[in-house]
Image: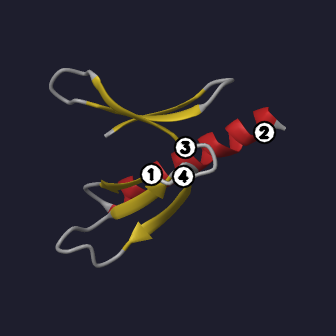
Amino acid sequence: MGAVASNSYECLLSYCCQETGDIELTVVVRSCLMNTVHNYGNRKHVFRLETAHGSAYLFETDTEDVMLDWIRAIKRCIVVDNEEVE
């Protein structure tokens, strides 16, 4: 899927193309909202991320464990980012 990184400026979620490694999408996740999505067609292990600017993204993983790992990683990034702001 991508990588979660936090620096002294922003907490970012980046999606990289598996074939080229190029970054295709970067999302600022400061103050974002996340929740799991149930009954999204025939897709399993989907979560939704909504940014403070109102953009929403759906992410699908292969397993529930991977989905929960992503959610935890993003939440940890947000906590670190918020602590740096205060």
Give the CA distance from mark 2 to mark 3.
14 Å
Which mark is in front, 3 or 4? 3
Question: Between disc 2 and disc 3, whose residue precedes?
Answer: 3
Which residue was labeled with disc 4?
A: 72
Question: Which amino acid lies under the numbered mark 3 shown in the image of this protein?
Answer: Val
Q: What residue is drawn where x is 69% and y is 23%? A: 8
Q: What residue is drawn where x is 34% and y is 76%? A: 38
Which percent across, then down, holds residue 27?
46, 38
Which mark is in front, 2 or 4? 2
Mark 2 nearby-residue class (10 Å; few <14, some 14–19, many ≥20)? few
Regarding mark 2 in the picture, which secondary structure is present there? helix
Which residue was labeled with disc 1?
A: 55
Which mark is in front, 1 or 2? 1
The answer, for residue 68, to whether it is visible in the render is no
Give the CA distance from mark 3 to mark 4.
13 Å
Question: Between disc 1 and disc 2, whose residue precedes?
Answer: 1
